[in-house]
Amino acid sequence: MKKMLFLSFACLVQEYTFAQRGQDIAYSRYIVREINLHHEHNRIIFGNRAELPSILLDALQQGAKAYNYTDPTQTVSYEQVQEKLLIGTAEDSCNFSFYTPQDLYIVELTEQFIFDKQMSEFRFIPVSLTLFIPAEISTKGIMEPIAVFPFEECTRIFRKDARAFSAVTKLGQSAINFNEQFLLRSYASNIVKIGNKDDLYFDQQYNNQYQAFIAMKKEEQALQEMMYAAYHPAGIERKAEKRKKQMLSTAGYKNDFNDTMHR
């Protein structure tokens, strides 16, 4: 039984490592998820010390590729990243320090949501990971992007680094590499952007956090209903009617919003 499960898991991971042929994509949209490494669930996946940024930055120092957030055609070096992590000015030798990798606990995952007509299935394909200085500790009071790592590069990095394994919490449980954790979508996250013509985050499109959260939930629900309709065409009318009733009251969304804000 264990051997069968292992083979199924291996097939799943192998499936996602194949390059996606453009002609097989009938539908595509990009989704950006914010992953807080301090979230209780993510501590189990990525460790209490938030090792993910350390692993990526150490690899960058050793020659891995990363790119500029505002200009994805431009690579960034380890030295350039260190300049972004500088607090104060290098000229003032008495009053400067650096953000540590553990300070970079906000990570954005960009993924491509597609419908593969060849396989007749929807897929979430990881595209990149972006490291940020969180707004809570930034001297500028905003999230500051540090570097964008293509997920293909992350895969190579994770498979070579002994730190890139989830914590073992149960007797007999095997440690799972970070690469597989992302492919299996085991992390806790919040959607902060779904592809739109202006390429704006939800909090850039709306005046307050609650409106942005409601818009995100509606977009997320629309994607879920599209997947449900593809596989259960006979049941979509019943599900749509149920959703219509739920949308008449925003109480459930308010509870979800409050839970998100208090994480």
Image (spheres, rainbow, N blue to C red):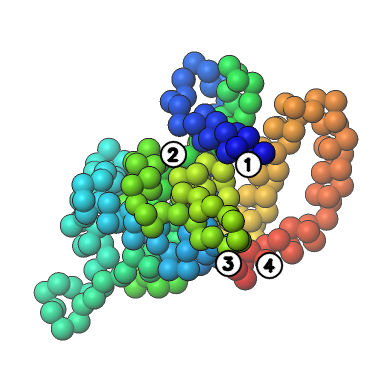
The reply to whether the C-beta atoms of the residues labelled 3 and 1 are less than 8 Å apart is no
Residue identified by numbered label 4? 258
Q: Please identify the quarter of the rendering in which residue 119 is found.
A: top right
Q: Earlier in the sequence, mark 3 or mark 1?
A: 1
Image depth: mark 3 or mark 1 in front? 1
Q: Earlier in the sequence, mark 2 or mark 3?
A: 3
Characterize the local packing of mark 3: few (<14), some (14-19) or many (20 or more) Cα atoms within 10 angstroms. few
The reply to whether the C-beta atoms of the residues labelled 3 and 4 are less than 8 Å apart is no
In percent of the image, x 70 and y 32: which residue is there? 226
Left or right placement of residue 137 versus residue 189 in this view:
left
Q: Earlier in the sequence, mark 3 or mark 4?
A: 3
Residue identified by numbered label 3? 40
Characterize the local packing of mark 2: few (<14), some (14-19) or many (20 or more) Cα atoms within 10 angstroms. some
Q: Secondary structure at mark 3?
A: helix
Q: Earlier in the sequence, mark 2 or mark 1?
A: 1
The reply to whether the C-beta atoms of the residues labelled 2 and 3 are less than 8 Å apart is no
Residue identified by numbered label 2? 127
| Residue type of the residue flagged with mark 4 | Asn
| Residue type of the residue flagged with mark 3 | Glu
Distance between mark 3 and mark 1 Cα atoms: 29 Å
In percent of the image, x 51 and y 61: which residue is there? 167
Image depth: mark 2 or mark 4 in front? 2
In percent of the image, x 13 and y 79: which residue is there? 93
- Residue nearer the viewer, 59 or 174: 174
In percent of the image, x 45 and y 31: which residue is there? 17
Q: Secondary structure at mark 2?
A: strand
Q: Earlier in the sequence, mark 1 or mark 4?
A: 1
Distance between mark 2 and mark 4 Cα atoms: 30 Å
